[in-house]
Amino acid sequence: MSALANVIPLKSYQKNRLVPPSDPESPEPVALYSLIVLALVLHAPVTYDGICGQCGLDWPCPQMRLAYRLREGF
């Protein structure tokens, strides 16, 4: 009395690999510092009378003041 059991097919095993992100994001302080540097470069006075080259306001413009305060916070 030896009856053979039905064979159960096994599913092919694939290891669950994490897909690396296509564009790795910078840590927040690094990204913030690079934005501060960009603001300091773009919001510079263009003329001698102190007009911001980016926004056209009197220099130092509000964006420049904010970037400087954030930079000093580091």
Image (tube, rainbow, N blue to C red):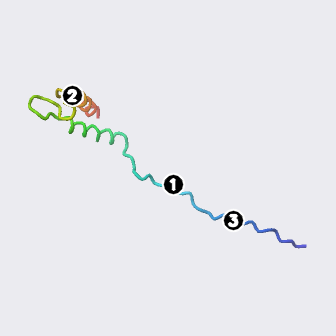
Q: Earlier in the sequence, mark 1 or mark 2?
A: 1
Please tell me in which quadrant of the rendered image residue 43 appears.
top left
Instruction: Give SS at disc 1.
Output: loop
Measure how far apart labels 3 and 1 are at the Cα level. 23 Å
Q: Is residue 18 left or right of residue 25?
A: right
Instruction: Give SS at disc 3.
Output: loop
Circle 2 is placed at which residue position?
Answer: 61
Mark 2, other Cα within 10 Å: few <14 / some 14–19 / many ≥20? some
At x 23%, y 28%, the residue is: 65
The type of residue carrying mark 1 is Leu
Q: Which residue is the extreme one toward the right?
A: 1
Please tell me in which quadrant of the rendered image residue 49 appears.
top left
At x 15%, y 33%, the residue is: 45
Is the residue 11 above or below the residue 39 in the image? below
**Disc nearest the viewer among 3 and 2:** 2
Marks 1 and 2 close (CB-CB < 8 Å):
no
> x and y percent of residue 71 in the render?
26, 34
Mark seen at residue 57: none
Marks 3 and 1 close (CB-CB < 8 Å):
no
The type of residue carrying mark 2 is Cys
Q: How many marks?
A: 3
Mark seen at residue 18: 1
The type of residue carrying mark 3 is Leu
Measure how far apart labels 3 and 2 are at the Cα level. 68 Å
Mark 1, other Cα within 10 Å: few <14 / some 14–19 / many ≥20? few
Circle 3 is placed at which residue position?
Answer: 10
Q: Is residue 9 left or right of residue 3?
A: left
Q: Is residue 11 left or right of residue 66?
A: right
Q: Quadrant of the C terminus?
A: top left
Mark 3, other Cα within 10 Å: few <14 / some 14–19 / many ≥20? few
> x and y percent of residue 61 in the render?
21, 28
